[in-house]
Image (cartoon, rainbow, N blue to C red):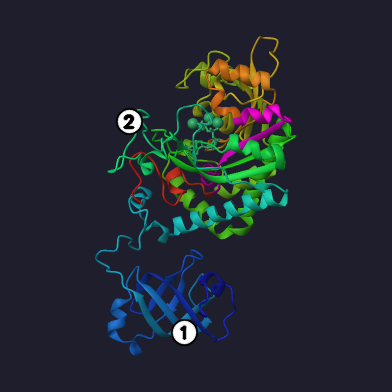
Amino acid sequence: SDRIKIKALLQTTPTEQQVNVKGWVRTFRNNQFIALNDGSTNSNLQIVVDFENTDAAILKRITTGAALSVTGTLVASLGKGQTVEVKATQIEILGDSDPEKYPLQPKKHSLEFLREIAHLRFRTNTFGAVFRVRNSLAFAVHQFFQERGFVYLHTPVITASDAEGAGEAFKVTNLDLNNPPKTETGEIDFKQDFFGRATNLTVSGQLEGELGAMALSDIYTFGPTFRAENSNTTRHLAEFWMIEPEMAFYDLDDNMDLAEGLLKYVIKYALEHNREDIEFLSQRLQEEEKSKPQQERSDMSLLEKLEFCLNNDFERLTYTEAIEILKNSTQNKKKKFQFLIEEWGADLQSEHERYLVEKHFKKPVILTDYPKAIKAFYMRQNEQDANGHETVRAMDILFPGIGEIVGGSQREERLDKLEQRMDEMGIPKEELWWYLDTRRFGACPHSGFGLGFERLVLFVTGMGNIRDVIPFPRFPKNAEF
Ligand code: ATP
Ligand code: MG
Ligand code: MG
Ligand code: MG
């Protein structure tokens, strides 16, 4: 077909050429002006209808939401904010939309309302912008790793291991080994119990990723991840996408450099390729800010925040240093934290992370060397420090408005240390024999991290709720579409 996308059309100079466009009606004014949108940009194309020579039956069917094919002449536009418009010579209704029933009216809808009609919210400017930005970020992630010779390794979604041992995995089945579900003919029903084996949906591709890195050197996974967390926060989903690189011969500094480099690269990419959408979202956020009390308003626009993040080194400090800052903060002394920081060893809550990022350093922060007791078994153990504190080579990257965006570490490559830790934590070694093999045959220093893709999209779009940056959010009781 000779259809031209509206984004491309709006950039051409009017030459009285014949064009064809297809899209959905956003508004139809005075029986004369159609604002047509095809999702390539938030800017609508103005179609001028020659209503005297158009069939009345057709005119009646040009309603908000209807799908049209329009052929006409591309001409200069006198309307403000647009350089071209199309004088229609032929309008074909591809799909009607009953104006009485169509839920999207040409007005601003609340995000809560749009979440209830997530199947139609793609047709709004906000979600058009969000999902185009999300697309660019995903592409940029691949480009970043591909340019650096990383291998995109697909790790399994169904697995028998619960990588973190944190009990956050959704069971694929509720398999009772003594009484497995049977078919009518008495055989084990493999559809119900994964061929008679207890399995779950992956919570992380890391352990499998490490296997790849122990031969391919640098790999990354980028796929859906599942967590059975019955939480209703604005930062957690039951199904989210995670980017997990694993690199042989990387220490923690190399790991942090890569993570910081990745974040800056993809943000820069989005700013360059989705300027219009990010400007729109920035504007949208500024309007939203106006409804907040003065002291809660952000002093930077979304665009300024993104630029700031690109142009400044992330602050790097240890957990121990962070605890000192938090302990001595007026916030803590005035008992304004919900969870007061009393001593070394406490797990940081998001209020503490956000204090460090938003109030203290006022920039992205990388915290390293967390207490061993609050981190996963596979993180590399440090020597005990002078105060007798036991830490691991972990790093979390904390972002303004988001909190934790990346969690990573140098991995424990020493078999004896790893086994000892697994014993202490009650993690069955026999179930992870394949993982331990990498420590038996050619073990080497290596590192990796997990970047929550939706948290990245949240940051770049300035949206406030993680359910609004994934096309089909999965959260407690929500799985219909
Ligand atoms: P949090 O402390 O926010 O619950 P976590 O420490 O449990 O995160 P990790 O296991 O470190 O998460 O996972 C790596 C990254 O995946 C996190 O830094 C975050 O960006 C993202 N992430 C984790 N859980 C979720 C979730 N339920 N929904 C969306 N993103 C998530
Ligand atoms: Mg968590
Ligand atoms: Mg965490
Ligand atoms: Mg984490």
Residue 418 is left or right of residue 285, and the answer is right
Residue 370 is left or right of residue 258, and the answer is left
Height in image: 195 above or below 47? above
Which amino acid lies under the numbered mark 2 shown in the image of this protein?
A: Asn
Residue 436, percent from left and from top: 63, 27
SS at circle 2: loop
State yes or no: Cβ of the residue under disc 2 lies below 8 Å from any atom of ligand 1: no
Disc 1 target residue? 72
Q: Earlier in the sequence, mark 1 or mark 2?
A: 1
Disc 2 target residue? 179
Q: Nearer the viewer, residue 434 or 455?
A: 434
The circle drawn on residue 93 is none
Magenta residues span 434-460
SS at circle 1: strand
Residue 353 is left or right of residue 51, and the answer is right
The residue carrying pointer 2 sits among few (fewer than 14), some (14 to 19) or many (20 or more) residues within 10 Å by Cα, namely: few
Residue 194 lies in quadrant: top left
Height in image: 175 above or below 272? above
Residue 452, percent from left and from top: 54, 40
The stretch drawn in magenta includes residue 136? no
Height in image: 423 above or below 55? above
The stretch drawn in magenta includes residue 454? yes
Gap in Å between the C-alphas at discs 1 and 2?
A: 68 Å
Disc number lying in front (1 or 2): 2
Which amino acid lies under the numbered mark 1 shown in the image of this protein?
A: Gly
Height in image: 421 above or below 168? above
Can residue 324 be seen at all in this image of the molecule?
no
Residue 388 lies in quadrant: top right
Residue 176 lies in quadrant: top left
The residue carrying pointer 1 sits among few (fewer than 14), some (14 to 19) or many (20 or more) residues within 10 Å by Cα, namely: many
Can residue 25 be seen at all in this image of the molecule?
yes
